[in-house]
Amino acid sequence: MASQPEAQVRDWSLTDVWRGLNKPVFIPAVIIIVGGLIFATWFGAEYGDEAFETLNSTIVDGIGWWYVLLGAAFVLFTFWAGLSKAGNIRLGRDEEKPEFSLGSWFTMLFSAGMGIGLVFWGVAEPLWHFVAPPEVTGDIGFDEGGALISPTQSAAMGDAMGQTIFHWGLHAWAMYVVVGLGLAYMTYRRGRPLSVRWLLEPIFGRKLIESWIGHVIDVVAIVGTVFGIVTSLGLGTQQIAGGLGFMDWADPDNPALLTVLVAVIMAIATISVVSGVNKGLKWLSNFNMVIAALMAFFVLIAGPTLFLLQSFVGNVGEYLVAFPQLLFESGADYAGGDGEGLGNAWSADWTIYYWGWWMSWAPFVGMFIARISRGRTIREFVLGVLLAPTLIGILWFSIFGSAGIWYQITEGNMLVSDGEGGETVGNDESLFLLLENLPLTEIMAVVALMVITIFFITSGDSGSLVTDVLSYGGRTETPKLSRVFWTVLIAVTAIVLLAAAQDPAASLRVLQVASISAAAPLSVVYLLAMIAQIRLYIYEGRTAARYVRVRRHATKAALVDVAREEAGTEQGREVERNLLTLLGRQTRSLRGMFGGTSATLAGLPSGAGVRKQAEGKANDDLVIAVEDVPAYATTVDTESGVLNWNREDGYRDPLSDVGFETPEYAESYEGWAHEAEEYFDETVATGTIPVLEGENSPEEGTEK
């Protein structure tokens, strides 16, 4: 249902909260989340940790190819939207300026791109791809004796960085663009409520979107968002526990530690969410960005600086190599497999897991970047959201990931025991093992713990706000009591999923299963949203006016050249006479071409009424709006021969033309244009067109 005009709601009134909730969305979403937790708890207790491995493989085998194909389609769509004619469309009114400066906007995009995931995987993932690469790069051939030829350390390091950045680059942000751009367009351009359901109005129509179909879409968005955020919170909890163990402050293998960490940190997030976006959340986000940047700068300076700077340049190239190589790869196994080519363990553990995670996060991040992008054009939005965070991600992994591989090659101290006599990558400990190679280890470990904790708080805080907005049908101002409810539910979800695994080491697989499963229904919503946006942007791209400048005459130099050529001399009265004659003939030609309806087009001399009306802003040029008209929509009047067209035959707006009684609609481009057009029609129909000083009365009278 459409959001209603926002009345004052008491923050702690249970009656007001219940009355305002969109109950067909809120109740099913909560039931599904609780049901998922019950299933995970029962499944883990009944079948053990290996069952989650089997369940993950089953899901990946069934939908992994679909995630990979859809991810490639998202990237293609975003570049089409940004580089095509649709890129000129402004997310707001045509003359509207961006709400935030370019610098502030990029800073906030940086904050959206940063999070627990980057801190958790910044060192660990490149190490994993270095020691356990996929077969597409790890097995490069066999010699004459049949022995496997492995890549050099340098090649393996480059491949590892390219594969890592592939997972955190354009694909991730293309998924966010599909949701964020759609929400920004529908809200700021077309006046729809800030809710995922309205992305699909061009597909289903307004009536169905306000019915059960719209409710299902928002339920899917809430459930996917909750499980996507919980995945990040689970990673953060594990890394905090690993850091506490590194500092000998707690036993990281104690199962109760994860529960205590989630409970304490989400309690702090509750305080933040109650204080509001402009206080707690904004302050924490800005503070953490500074601390994270300082931590990265410290590693760059204290670590192998020259090597890391060289790596940044080289890693850009590695990403460009990995992108086409892995774009459609959904069945890669680890190098050194059975050689059958039937395994997909590497793709399941990394690419498919990430694509599911990003899709689960898309309503959360998409809504955030939509809210900060009002006034931008689609081209600015797409290029900014795609390129800025991707470059930041390359820089982050070039510092932490390349440094981790460097110390593994030179010192051999970045792996941990696997408990079976071998070594493996310690996901939770990798960041702290890196810091152990640098000065001020204990201080920087505390800083790292603080960064992870604050990201934990802001993720839970922002996630509760987004789910609350969706449960209120797009209303942006929601009561604090319902925000607290979602914060508590997210915390409980994280605790239960982490506890579902019998062994804490297996909890990561539980989180992966949650993300991949929750993303499945969301993927269908995103596909339809992408199709809907293509329809909308094609329609508006065809009907939007193109502003062109029409000169009343050829260039001054060209006219003078013709006058001199006819006079046979470079200057003199004859040249002047020829020039004035040319101007007069041109004015008469334009008058005959355009008719006498426009004083400017008829060549009204400078200094007359037009200049008075423009108060010095008039010039000799004319700016007109040009709109492309399809040939099949044109008609020729049989009596006059005048060319005309039927707009309904030419273009059909995919959206309903019925307005909304909401603040979003009144502030949008469509709402503003609708109000202005009504005012114009009423004024022309009932008023009298005034005659300005120095003008003649209109030829057809003044009464309309």
Image (tube, helix red, strand yellow):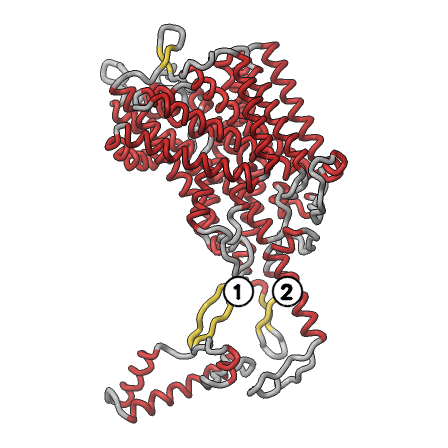
Q: Is residue 128 visible?
A: no
- Residue 526 is left or right of residue 409, and the answer is right
Q: Residue at x 30, y 21 (%)?
A: 437
Name above or below for residue 522 compared with residue 36: below
Amino acid of disc 2: Ala
Q: Nearer the viewer, residue 433 or 573?
A: 433
For the N terminus, the quadrant is top right
Q: Residue at x 25, y 23 (%)?
A: 152
- Residue 591 in picture, x, y percent from top left: 49, 83
Q: Residue at x 62, y 33 (%)?
A: 222
- Residue 139 is left or right of residue 381, and the answer is left
Q: Which SS class for mark 2?
A: helix
Q: Is residue 306 visible?
A: yes
Precedes in sequence: disc 2 or disc 1? 1
Mark 2 — residue?
Answer: 676
Mark 1 — residue?
Answer: 627
- Residue 168 in picture, x, y percent from top left: 42, 33
Amino acid of disc 1: Glu
Q: Residue at x 33, y 90 (%)?
A: 578
Q: Which SS class for mark 1?
A: loop
Name above or below for residue 267 compared with residue 23: above
Q: Nearer the viewer, residue 94 or 636?
A: 94
Badge nearest the viewer, 2 or 1: 2
